Image: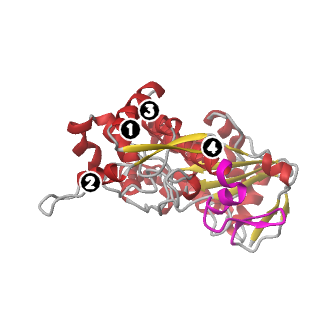
Amino acid sequence: MGWWQVNADTLAGSRFVVSPLAETFASLKMLHGGTGTHPGERSWLAAHLPAYRAELARDPVTALLVRAGLGEEWIADFLTPAPREGETFAAEIARVRGADPAAARAHLTLSLRGPLPAALHRDDLPGRAADLLTYVWEETVRPYWERRRRVLEADVLARTALLGQSGWAAVLDALRPGMRWLGENRLQVNAHEYPPREISGARLVFVPITPQRTGWVAWEERERYAVVYPCSGVLADGDRPTAGPAALGPLLGDARARILVLLDSPMSTTQLCAVTGQTLGSVGRHLRVLLDAGLIRRGRAGRSVLYARTPEGEVLVRAATTPSPSTPSPSTPSPCAAPARAPSPRAAPAHPFSPSGV
């Protein structure tokens, strides 16, 4: 297994960071694979995969570069620089474009686990990679970025709440498959048999992405390390029935009904604002009405005030989201048009106001 030696100060100073380039590279990986894990991802692929393949067909060198860079076990390092807090896509892609050509060829050789094809013995590989990633960003990610960013920020809020409630071990164990806290300052980052790395004293960041079944680690030696992981949220549960808000709208109002449906796991007002796009005042008013109606309840987890559905609220949502035998199930919208859901556990948490299942 691959693991990092991380001292307490490095872990305490780590941050969750949202990265446009990480989201773009994860989308490139999904386009390259051509398959989605749920209807939301498959809808997105249906909309963008033909144009992506046509783009590569016009440029065989870049197509070969992509195949070489996305190795079976190792991604070419220059394609995934470690994200930095607050960076724009333009700043991030400039670091890809500015990679040393010789280093890029060495990274590709490592990801291929064999000799580099003759067509890739050239100095413009970083520029070609940056151009393709810019295409993926502009055409397939940026149009949906505001919504995706809200989903990612909600995931960060949920992980931060879990950190305050249960500590780093609980956060790291739930972050991505193959990753867990081993104790004795050791963080297992994947299941591959790679040599341990001493990263104490470096900057460590954790970066959520919306595409599922992907993730990677990145680093700038002795300075910065990153763990990129798939977030929990709407894209992870894209095949969940979405009839609830529409069915409850005439009774509660569309915005209020949506909040009730989102509260299948405890959430704060800040999280609800992040995933719905509503203002803090609007969310607060809707929560007050739902509280007065007995459909939700309020509790405290550490310093956070969290809201969750009551049994009465559960009955109402279940009735609204269960189609009758004669009513066909609604289709799932595309991942970029569907309303965002908060990060939620696969199984209900032991206590209604404990975020430990996120």
* Dot 4 alpha-carbon crowd within 10 angstroms: few under 14, some 14 to 19, many 20 or more: many
Residue 124 vs residue 261, the one in the foreground: 261
Q: Nearer the viewer, mark 4 or mark 3?
A: 3
Counting from the top left corner in percent of width and height, residue 133 is at: 57, 45
Q: Which residue is mark 4?
A: 130
Q: Which residues are magenta?
A: 164-191
Name the element at disc 2.
helix
Q: Name which residue lies at 38% across and 50% down.
A: 310
* Dot 1 alpha-carbon crowd within 10 angstroms: few under 14, some 14 to 19, many 20 or more: some
Q: Quadrant of the C terminus?
A: bottom right
Image-quadrant location for residue 170: bottom right
* Dot 3 alpha-carbon crowd within 10 angstroms: few under 14, some 14 to 19, many 20 or more: some
Q: First in sequence, mark 4 or 3: give its number.
A: 4
Residue 187 is one of the magenta-drawn residues: yes
Q: First in sequence, mark 3 or 1: give its number.
A: 3
Q: Which residue is mark 1?
A: 291
Residue 47 vs residue 174, the one in the foreground: 174
Tag 3: residue type? Gly
Tag 4: residue type? Ala
Q: First in sequence, mark 1 or 4: give its number.
A: 4
Q: Quadrant of the N terminus?
A: bottom right
Name the element at disc 1.
helix
Image-quadrant location for residue 356: bottom right
Q: Name which residue lies at 76% across and 46% down.
A: 14
* Dot 2 alpha-carbon crowd within 10 angstroms: few under 14, some 14 to 19, many 20 or more: many
Q: Which residue is mark 2?
A: 321
Q: Nearer the viewer, mark 1 or mark 2?
A: 1
Q: Image check: 254 left or right of 353?
A: left
State the CA–CA distance, disc 2 to disc 4. Answer: 44 Å
Counting from the top left corner in percent of width and height, residue 17 is at: 66, 42
Q: Nearer the viewer, mark 2 or mark 3?
A: 2
Tag 1: residue type? Leu
